[in-house]
Image (tube, helix red, strand yellow):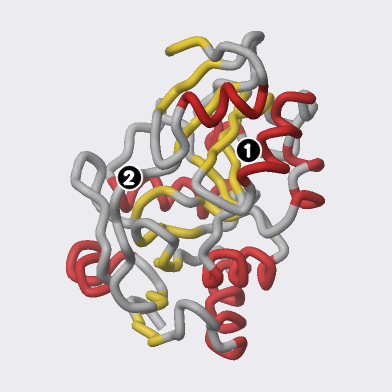
Amino acid sequence: MRGKTVAIDSLSPESRNIDKAARVIKAGGLVVYPTETFYALGADALNERAVRKVYEVKGRSFSKALTLIIHNRESLLPLVAAVPPGAEKLMAKFWPGPLTIVFKAAGILPSLVTAGTGSIGIRIPSSATAIALACATGRPLTATSANPSGLRGFTRAGEASASLGEEIDMILDGGRTRGGTASTIVDFTVPPPVLIRTGTISREMLEKCLNIKIAAS
């Protein structure tokens, strides 16, 4: 199975292929999958050994926390210590979509995922494949880009295969992704919330939703 590439329809992914990928992840393996922007490297975020492999494959510093995806709002609650009212407003407005919200992490998450910070960035993607995979696994998935640390994100499965193919277990090839700007990141672990990274969703859009000014990082 190592490095096996499976073609999927990114708009309506076939359940049999999603189920195959979910079994790989549940067994502690790594799966490359398309999101609405770039290809991502997915692992079970609750499996510390699998998370460690994500860091090692990317050459990512263990001091940098990973971001996660989930498939619905209910999946968020076991992963975070609290959901601030402001975060609720942004979730209602921008999820599913390119908005990552940083919460105080619950004890269920391995410290390796949070890089010892005690906080975790989470989003619900608008990608049908990413949502289907998270739903099929029933676990939060790592959503770091499927490329060596420091390089640009990949928009084609073949790029990820050429770069990481020997180190991963399965690649879901949904064709070329649109690339572009990564997700906006807002930190709600401190008041007022802090804009960590500006992406598709602008500061003005966030402030209009919250009716407050957002601090810059």
Q: Quadrant of the C terminus?
A: top left
Q: Secondary structure at mark 1?
A: loop
Quarter-wise, where is residue 101 in the image? top right
Residue 192 lies, with reference to residue 109, above or below; the image says above
Q: Quadrant of the N terminus?
A: bottom left
Callout 2, which amino acid? Thr
Q: Residue at x 45, y 78 (%)?
A: 10
Identify the residue under disc 1. Answer: 110
Q: CA distance from mark 2 to mark 1?
A: 29 Å
Q: Residue at x 25, y 71 (%)?
A: 161
Mark closer to the observer (2, 1): 2
Identify the residue under disc 2. Answer: 181
Callout 1, which amino acid? Pro
Residue 191 lies, with reference to residue 117, above or below; the image says above
Q: Residue 82: where, in percent of width, then height?
A: 79, 27
Q: Residue 65: where, in percent of width, then height?
A: 47, 32
